[in-house]
Amino acid sequence: MKGSSEHLREALLDVELARQREQALRLESESVAMCLSTLTLASKPEQMFAELLRVLKLVLDFDEACIVRAEGLGVETLVSTSSIFSKELRHHRDMLVRLKPAQPLAIFDVSKLLEWNNQSPEMLPKVKSALYVPLQGSPPTSMLLATSAQQGHFRQSHVRRAKRLSFLVSQALERASDQKKMMELQQQLIDTARTAGKAEMAIRVLHHLGNAMNSISVSLDQLRENIQTLPLPRIDDIADLATKEPKELVDYLQNDQRGKLVLPYLNALSGAVHRRLDVAHATLSDLDEQVQNIARYVDDQNTRIESVEHFSKCDSHELIEKAIAKAKQDKLKNDIAIEITTPEAISFYCAGFVLCDILSELIANASSALQRITTRARTVMVSVVHAVPDSICFIVEDSGPGFTKQQLDALFTPDYRQGGFGLHDAAIAARRLGGSLSAQSDGPNQGAIFTLTVPLHHAESTVEK
């Protein structure tokens, strides 16, 4: 009877141990699934690491943990569950070097380790035992450090679990490194595109100034020609007559055949001089206008450069009117009808010069597309609406030839340019404003719709910005 009771007790213990192992395996499997889901769905490295630590805490049962990597002569904390790790782990570079690949190390009592002897009084009561998990490289270049306030907390079961799960954290580190490289590459592309945009703008500035200087040169040549062809020598000959005695001059003008031609000649000369003066005045007016255009253009460029990040209160209708005027000045044809279809204006804060440039390009681009339309009305409709909360949408719609899916993919590339600001530069400028620029068309001959979405800034947030 006694033997049967002992066998029963052993059987119950085996069942309990099996149940505990089953629960542990189930928890570990669920943790692996959650970690894989985190690796797949997390959009930012910080979010991914924080979620991984949360999941690993269920399996490894630690109080605090962090992920560190080698950095110079010390270590850098990538993520941690406590702020104290960021300044307390500078002495753990040697431990990282001593770790063997894929072999976690459980420390029963951290006071026996030199790395923990120099910790602050704030940290010592919180860390009695530790679990070091090597992650990448041979020797490892990063590790997971889990701690507990209980001495001897981490055992071989924790080591085995950590060894099985370490590959997930290593994968997270690799993905974070890939994302960092991708972000750096993307930033390089943005910087390159911005530099190309600046070069394009400089070329456009030189083009405008060159046109103005050519006009000034032509006007100066006309003025020089008018001055050089004035009949000044004949006026000098007539002036010599005034040196004669009055009686001789009267007799010469009345009786001499040549003298009789003097007064009619003076009348004709007066008319010719007045006509040339009118031409000279008109030429001077053109010169003054060209010089003022250059001054306005330079001032506009300076103001635009200084105001790229300057937010001011804007009225949507006034902004659209300015964009239409700028498009007409640049390349908009007069036979294109522009309609503002939004009855009420919207007031908001934005970088007005940048937004005006983008809208002007969209309107001018629609106008260029409509030049190919001869069988129906050529109209560009501009509207503005509230989008999602704290956003505003400017919509430019035309009845032009539209575009295909393949053409849509090329619209915002640097090579696609109708002239002027360019859709590629417009899209970059929209992103700098925190917004976006998109295009859609139902196909050839179905027109096109461009949508510019920008944040709806308020006065308070703008002042802080």
Image (cartoon, grey):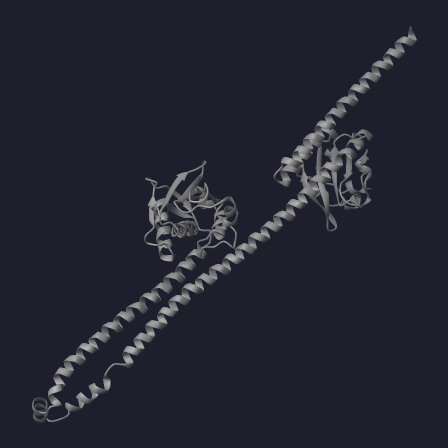
Above or below, 51 against 313 in this view is above
* Residue 68 image point, x, y percent: 72, 42
Residue at coordinates 63% horizontally, 47% vertically from top-left?
182
Residue 223 lies left or right of residue 111; in this view the side is left
Tell me if I can see residue 128 in this picture. Answer: no
* Residue 266 image point, x, y percent: 15, 82
* Residue 355 image point, x, y percent: 42, 49
Residue at coordinates 38% horizontally, 57% vertically from top-left?
330
Residue sticking out furthest to the top: 1
Which image quadrant: the N terminus? top right
* Residue 11 image point, x, y percent: 85, 14
Above or below, 239 against 38 in this view is below
**Residue 286 location, quadrant:** bottom left
**Residue 397 location, quadrant:** top left
Nearest to the observer: residue 99 or residue 371: 371
Residue 202 lies left or right of residue 255; in this view the side is right
Disc tally is 0
Tell me if I can see residue 282 in this picture. Answer: yes
Nearest to the observer: residue 284 or residue 23: 284
**Residue 317 location, quadrant:** top left
Residue at coordinates 37% horizontally, 42% vertically from top-left?
383
